[in-house]
């Protein structure tokens, strides 16, 4: 092979690796920033999303909404976006949202309906998009609904988002359970899980690839690693999903713990469904990657309690300042000025009704000192309502929006968008897409002052009908972190769910050719 041909193949391979494989598969923002200094940004060419099994409760229903925003510089003709059912190799799987609260045997199984039943239509694609800029939606009974494996390419890949919203009307798992379907990766942190007797937490592991994935699950409580009572290694067969009841991994009970999910081979999607016997249920999203400064956006103004869970995964302890960024400024919550987190241990503090009737976001920053700051992961359990009429949701530490982020399923009433600027003031544009049943997009520009949270009702599409998507674009200024709350009260219960809005990674930095492969010696 001559040197010129080798050089062209190498350049083409590098370009394909960056624009194809890099799409929505992880990677640190620091790496992206360093590459971007000498790179051109192009739309990703392929995206993969994984949706967990919603519920097999016979009193539940699920709405799926898929959306890709319109992007400049994207080919207007080619591409597809669709989801297909994943297989469930388990014969009998406990229902984490059913009337029995998901109580099963030692292996997390119970007698009952076989999990992973194919959706109506068998292998027929779910929610195929016809055009960017217009969402598609479908409703179906959750009982027997499978996990979904989705792929978008071409014009549908940049910013492709799928939202799964489940309503369970009765039983211990009653509530609104919302989650954005996630990209596959190899490492996830879930601070805020529980092995307590009043909680049933399942981690759903979905493998999108054609080879089995080997996955390790490790739990950390307030005194360190929870002693495993069984093998913590899980094999997830190709294009399959496996649910694991966390309390079956250890005999130790911890009201607040941290779960690390690591794929030793392959890649997976991971999502935790938490069912509280008293406070309802919801999906617990993964925290952003460990960071020395953390933003948890979107505490509701009427939150009756908030529980902060923090874990320091490194070799050093972490000393953190705790601030609440409200509508006008940032304050220190009374009695919680600072937080000491021991290495390898989960620390949890109850903040009570910390918002005091105003929306806010939690900001964790290094306390200071002579040594280097310690990265942490964090999450927040939020409760609205009281007594038998309370409902819970979870907000993880959320990465900043570099360019844009989208929440796919918004309704005419009940959506609240929260934006926090931890540092400098930021300017953002918020766009409501057309509705699934028609209408025209509407955009508005907002300024988020540094150190404050702006909670707002997002714009609605003009003459729109049906669910619609809301896209946040950072135009200028400092970092912005965002979340979206969807509130659908029912029979006096303030049912709600909160989803983080990390950057959608719809654009990728493609480095310019900097190496002349023709200089390589022939062997």
Image (spheres, rainbow, N blue to C red):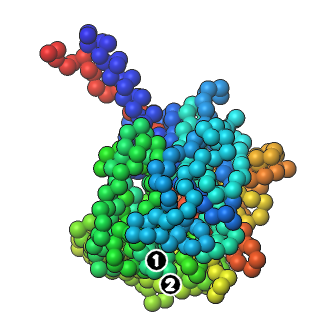
Looking at this rendering, what residue extends furthest in the right direction? 463
| Near-viewer residue (39 or 93) | 93
Q: Which residue is depicted at the point 61% across and 54% down? A: 144
Looking at this rendering, what residue extends furthest in the left direction? 523
Image coordinates of residue 127 in percent, x first then y, are 66, 42
Give the numbered dot on residue 351: 2
The answer to whether residue 434 is left or right of residue 511 is: right
Residue 493 seen in the current view: yes
Distance Cα–Cα, label 1 vs label 2: 7 Å
Which quarter of the image is occupied by the N terminus?
top left
Give the numbered dot on residue 505: none
CB under 8 Å between discs 1 and 2: yes
Within 10 Å of disc 1 (Cα), the crowding (few <14, some 14-19, many 20+) is: many
The answer to whether residue 400 is left or right of residue 440 is: left
Nearer the N terminus, badge 1 or badge 2? Answer: 1
Image coordinates of residue 30 in percent, x first then y, are 37, 50
Looking at this rendering, what residue extends furthest in the top direction? 2
Q: Which residue is depicted at the point 31% across and 57% down? A: 233
Write down the quadrant of residue 95 in the picture. Answer: bottom right
Q: Quick check: 122 above or below 232?
A: above
Q: Which residue is depicted at the point 47% across and 46% down? A: 240
Write down the quadrant of residue 281 in the picture. Answer: bottom right
Image coordinates of residue 387 in percent, x first then y, are 64, 87
Residue 300 seen in the current view: no
Which quarter of the image is occupied by the C terminus?
top left
Give the numbered dot on residue 308: 1
């Amino acid at each position: 092979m001559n040197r010129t041909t080798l050089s062209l193949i190498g350049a083409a391979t590098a370009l394909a690796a960056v624009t194809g494989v890099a799409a929505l598969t992880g990677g640190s923002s620091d790496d992206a920033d360093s590459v971007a200094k000498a790179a051109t940004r192009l739309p990703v060419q392929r995206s993969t999303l994984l949706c967990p099994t919603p519920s097999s409760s016979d009193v539940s229903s699920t709405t799926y909404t898929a959306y890709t925003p319109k992007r400049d510089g994207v080919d207007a003709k080619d591409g597809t976006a669709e989801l297909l059912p994943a297989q469930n190799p388990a014969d009998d799987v406990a229902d984490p949202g059913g009337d029995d609260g998901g109580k099963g045997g030692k292996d997390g199984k119970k007698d009952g309906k076989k999990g992973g039943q194919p959706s109506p239509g068998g292998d027929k694609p779910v929610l195929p998009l016809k055009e960017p800029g217009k969402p598609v939606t479908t409703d179906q009974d959750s009982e027997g609904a499978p996990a979904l494996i989705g792929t978008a390419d071409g014009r549908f890949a940049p910013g492709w988002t799928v939202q799964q919203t489940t309503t369970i009307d009765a039983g211990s798992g009653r509530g609104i359970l919302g989650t954005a379907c996630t990209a596959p990766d190899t490492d996830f942190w879930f601070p805020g899980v529980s092995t307590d007797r009043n909680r049933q937490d399942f981690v759903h592991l979905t493998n999108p690839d054609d080879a089995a994935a080997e996955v390790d699950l490790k739990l950390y409580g307030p005194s360190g690693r929870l002693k495993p009572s069984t093998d913590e290694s899980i094999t997830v067969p190709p294009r399959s999903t496996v649910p694991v009841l966390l309390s079956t991994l250890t005999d130790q009970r911890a009201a607040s713990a941290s779960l690390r999910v690591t794929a030793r081979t392959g890649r997976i999607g991971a999502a935790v469904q938490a069912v509280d016997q008293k406070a309802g249920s919801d999906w617990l999203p993964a925290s952003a990657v460990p960071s020395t400064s953390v933003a948890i956006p979107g505490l509701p103004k009427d939150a009756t309690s908030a529980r902060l869970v923090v874990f320091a995964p490194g070799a050093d302890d972490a000393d953190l300042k705790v601030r609440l960024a409200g509508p006008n400024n940032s304050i220190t919550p009374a009695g919680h000025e600072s937080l000491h987190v021991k290495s390898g241990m989960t620390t949890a503090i109850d903040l009570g009704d910390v918002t005091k009737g105003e929306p806010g976001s939690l900001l964790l920053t290094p306390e200071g000192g002579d040594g280097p700051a310690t990265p942490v992961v964090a999450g927040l359990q939020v409760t609205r309502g009281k007594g038998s009429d309370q409902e819970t949701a979870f907000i993880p530490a959320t990465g900043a929006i570099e360019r844009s982020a989208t929440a796919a399923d918004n309704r005419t009433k009940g959506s609240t968008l929260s934006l926090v600027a931890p540092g400098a003031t930021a300017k953002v544009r918020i766009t409501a897409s057309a509705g699934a049943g028609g209408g025209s997009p509407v955009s508005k520009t907002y300024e988020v002052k540094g150190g404050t949270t702006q909670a707002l009702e997002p714009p609605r599409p003009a003459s729109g009908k049906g669910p619609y998507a809301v896209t946040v674009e950072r135009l200028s200024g400092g970092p912005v972190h965002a979340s979206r709350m969807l509130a659908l009260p029912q029979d006096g219960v303030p049912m709600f769910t909160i989803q983080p809005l990390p950057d959608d990674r719809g654009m990728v930095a493609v480095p310019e050719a900097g190496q002349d492969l023709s200089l390589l010696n022939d062997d």
